[in-house]
Structure formats: C-alpha cells, structure tokens
Amino acid sequence: MNLSSDSEIDFSDEMQQIVTHPRYISTLAKLREQRDNRMKVLNFLENTRRNIIKHQYLYDVRQAECTCNDKVQSIMGRSAAKLEKAISAVQLEKQELMIIRGIRRRHSQNIKQQDSTDDTDVVQQEQQQDNNNNDEEDEEEDEISSSNDNDINQISGKQDKI
C-alpha cells in the first residue's frame, strides 16, 4: 500500500491483483449470471403482473358489461312496459277522440238538419209574409187604381160635359 500525499490509501495495485484473480473472475461471472437470472425472473413476474392486471381489467370490463347489459335490459324491459302502457293510453285517447268526433259530426248534422228545416220554415214564413204584403200592396194598388179610374172617369165625364 502506498500512501499518497493526500494521506489516501492507493488500492490500485491490490485491486488489480484481485480483479485479475481467477476466483474473482469466476465469482463475478456467477454473480452476473445470478443477476441476469433474477432480472429474467423479475421481468417474468412483471409481465405476469401486467397480464393479470390486463386480464383482471378485461374480466372487470366484461363483468361491468354484463352488469350494464343486465341493467340496460331491465331498464329496457321497464321502458318497454311503460311504452306499451303509453301506447295503449294513446290508443284509448284516440278512440275517445274518434267517438267524440263522431258525436260532434252527428250533432252538427242534426243541427244542420234543424237549421235546414228552420230555414225552410223561415223561408215559408217569409214567403207568406211577402204574399201577405203583396196582397196588401195589391189591394192598395187596386184601391189606388180604382180611385184613379174614378178620378179619370170623373175628369173625362166633366170633359164630356164641357
């Protein structure tokens, strides 16, 4: 061992001897081999862990999909039942509306018939009133014409006398 000026021990010669010693080389080779084997095992374990996680994830995803599908099917079943109820309710309302429309149509037809009979009655009454008025007017015209005729006769008689 050589002491340097900085009071450090110089191991370079001894290290050189140790590193080149056959036992050291074989031990070092065994250690490297063990390290490589450990690394292989660690890599295998890491890959296995990743696969397990991936498969667990896929399993969880499949389970979640199944659960989700079950829930969706149950919701769809409930929704289908609600939809069927809604459809039947709409159909009932449609039938009721058809009945109401039929009643309204019949009622409006009855009203039209009554109106037409009322109209004919009114027309007949108007015609009777017109006839009565015409009769009265005719009578007045007859009276006027007869009085005019009398006046004319009187005037013509006076003229004849003159």
Image: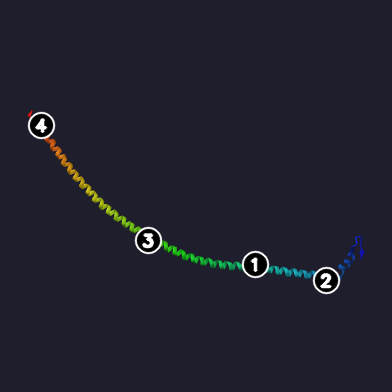
Q: Nearer the viewer, mark 2 or mark 4?
A: 4
Quick one: SS at disc 1?
Answer: helix
User: Residue 33: horizontal and vertical position, in percent?
Assistant: 78, 70
Quadrant, the C terminus: top left
> What is the three-letter code of the residue carrying label 1?
Lys
Q: Secondary structure at mark 4?
A: helix
Residue 17 image position (x, y, % from top left): 89, 67
Q: Which residue is mark 4?
A: 156
Q: Residues within 10 Å of mark 2 (few under 14, many from 20)?
A: few
Image quadrant holding the N terminus, namely bottom right
Query: Of label 2 and label 3, which has the lower sequence position?
Result: 2
Where residue 56 appears, x then y in whole percent? 63, 68
Is 21 above or below relative to 100?
A: below
Left or right: 90, with 138 as reference point: right
Task: Say whether marks 3 and 4 touch (CB < 8 Å).
Answer: no
Callout 3: SS: helix
Q: Please report the residue visible at 66 percent of the width from the left and 69 percent of the height from the top.
A: 52
**Which callout, 2 or 1, points at the residue further toward the start of the chain?**
2
Residue matched to label 2? 27
Q: Which residue is mark 1?
A: 54
- Give the SS element for disc 2: helix
